[in-house]
Image (tube, grey):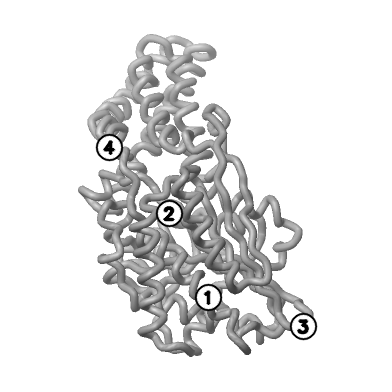
Amino acid sequence: MESKARVIESMREHIQSICDGIGPRLPCSEAERRCAEYIRKEWEKHADETCLETFTCHPGAYPATFRWPIALFLLSLGLYPFIPLLSFACSAASTLILVFNLILNRELIDRAFPAKESCNVVAQFDPPGPSDRRLILSCHHDTNFAFPIVNRFGGAAFSKFMTVVVLSSALMTVLTFLRVVFSITGPESLLNGFQKAALPFLVLLAATVPLQIYTFRRVLSREAVPGANDNLSGVAVCLLLAAHLSRAGARPRRTSVWLVSFGCEEFGIRGSKRFVERHRKEIQDAHVLNLDMVGGRGTRLRVISREQTILFPLSARMIRLVEEAARKEGIPLETGPLIAFTDAQAFAVKGIRATSLMALDEKGMVDTYHSMEDIPEHLDLDRIFDSYRLCRAVIEHIDSTDPT
């Protein structure tokens, strides 16, 4: 194995080069495309095949996913005493957007916005003989807007703010629905009784208005973050893995390895969703290990068991394979859930064996998450090196393990 110092220096150089030469990489931007080209040129030095796979998505839907539901909730609250049916329509629309676009990463409102082009990068490394299994190691190369709420209050606060938004919208939908039903079908006494019972809930919802207005204004800034940890740390690992796989004797004996870097991850894992749609038949039996934010300070490597806290379970078999590889190499690793989502979700919902490797603190967060402080100087390069070692161990372990 090449020296740790040399690997770390190569990783540092790649991350610094992209941060300095390309900068922030919003989905569907020219900078995102330039970063994809950088990755492709590096991979084509080593891989059997490389390509850029373009796809279209609607990035304008991402800010609206946060702001439209809040605006609709406030409108619903204001209309409640005067036009109950319209109030219900507004609150129901708010809840649907939150559930489908924000929580489930569906594309309910996306077509209301202009289509733009992004791209994934794919590199293939074939074994010297017949292949009876496939391993996909993935990352993403785009960055998000800064989250002012996270920067001021921390990542846990952002989750709490959005929980208030979701629960308020859901409660408003229930109240407006019941009022419409009682207005149409019930006697006036039943409606009056409901109005009295609903009053404390309406007062509670009204009390959230200042927080909702603050969230509307401050949920996203207009600045894109540098994205050194999120996710050039994962990109750096995949770049070094390509160089490793090109060395004599490093190729697995019977495993085809694909390295993939996704575009438009930050705006709802659109790149990985398009990749799965395009390659579904080829990759149905693949193993997938996604790398995201593997270089945070004060963190431990974690293999993710569930995303969105409990909603999306990831592959128990893939998690076990990663745990076994970590134990074999003596790499500290914990297993646990993630409150957000990663590209592994796009595979898992289609029944493909996938999980993500991340580096998280004891609260399950990273201090520079979606922050302007996500710069190369704040990386833990030793943690990225451990991720690289673990990926190599996973390749070897899957190659020597029964594919089922």
Task: Report the amino acid beneath label 3.
Answer: Gly
| Residue at 41% over, 62% down | 232
- Numbered circles on residues, count: 4
Q: Find disc 3 in the rendering and name its residue.
A: 129
Seen from the viewer's position, the closer of residues 109 and 11 is 11
Helix, strand or loop at label 2? It is: loop
Q: Where is residue 245 in the image (x, y as percent from the top left)?
A: 59, 79
In the image, taking residue 13 as reference, residue 139 lies left or right, namely right
Give the label on residue 12, or none: none
Looking at the image, is mark 1 or mark 4 nearer the viewer? 1
Q: Position of residue 189 (x, y in %)?
A: 41, 12
Seen from the viewer's position, the closer of residues 373 and 284 is 373
Alpha carbons under labels 1 and 4: distance apart = 39 Å
Give the label on residue 340, or none: 2
Alpha carbons under labels 1 and 3: distance apart = 20 Å
Alpha carbons under labels 3 and 2: distance apart = 40 Å
Q: Which of marks 4 and 3 is nearer the N terminus?
A: 3
Q: Is residue 78 something that shows in the picture?
A: yes
Task: Report the amino acid beneath label 1.
Answer: Leu
Give the label on residue 218, or none: 4
In the image, taking residue 43 as reference, residue 88 lies left or right, namely left
Alpha carbons under labels 1 and 2: distance apart = 26 Å
Seen from the viewer's position, the closer of residues 357 and 376 is 376
Q: Where is residue 192 in the image (x, y as percent from the top left)?
A: 38, 14
Alpha carbons under labels 2 and 4: distance apart = 19 Å
